[in-house]
Image: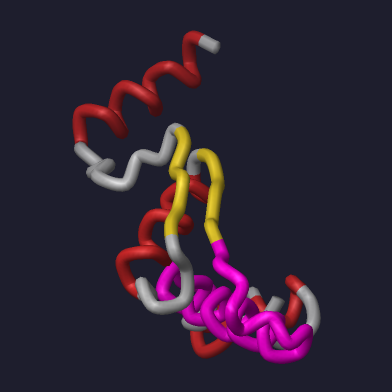
Amino acid sequence: MPYGNQEEAYKNASTLSLLTTEQALASFAVLITELKRNFSAQACPVVLFGGSYGGMLAAWMRLKYPYITIGSLASSAPVLARESVSCFNTIKTSWDVI
């Protein structure tokens, strides 16, 4: 969590700007690289996996940083999902029924 805690990170637009998918991928790239270096495991292959949002991150990580991992498994990952007004309205209307 940037800035140490959720309250501080969510405080204003400048801190919220770091809570993006792109930033998460960059953070994972640094984390994996540093872990491999710190444990003298540079030659060890890394495979990412995840479901839903984690699956999307695994797939995008492989696309954005192909030199860091050898593969990824994305389960139930809506990587091509697009928002639509009709979908939004359907979900919004469903709350009244629920």
Above or below for 83 versus 4: above
Q: Please give the name of the residue rendered at 39% of the width and 78% of the height, measured from the top-left corner.
A: 67
Quadrant of the rendering where the C terminus is positioned: top right
Where residue 71 sits: x, y (%)? 43, 57
Q: Nearer the viewer, residue 3 or 77?
A: 77
Q: Nearer the viewer, residue 90 or 51?
A: 51
Relative side of 6 to 24, left or right: right
Q: Which of 74 and 93 is in front in this view?
A: 74
Above or below for 88 versus 95: below
Above or below for 71 versus 1: above
Quadrant of the rendering where the N terminus is positioned: bottom right
Where residue 86 sits: x, y (%)? 20, 28
Above or below for 3 versus 62: below
Where residue 83 sits: x, y (%)? 25, 42
Residue 23 colored magenta?
yes
Q: Please give the name of the residue rendered at 56% of the width and 80% of the height, measured from the top-left corner.
A: 27
Relative side of 82 to 57, left or right: left
Magenta part of the chain: 19-46
Q: Please give the name of the residue rendered at 52% of the width and 72% of the height, measured from the top-left corner.
A: 24
Q: Quadrant of residue 91?
A: top left
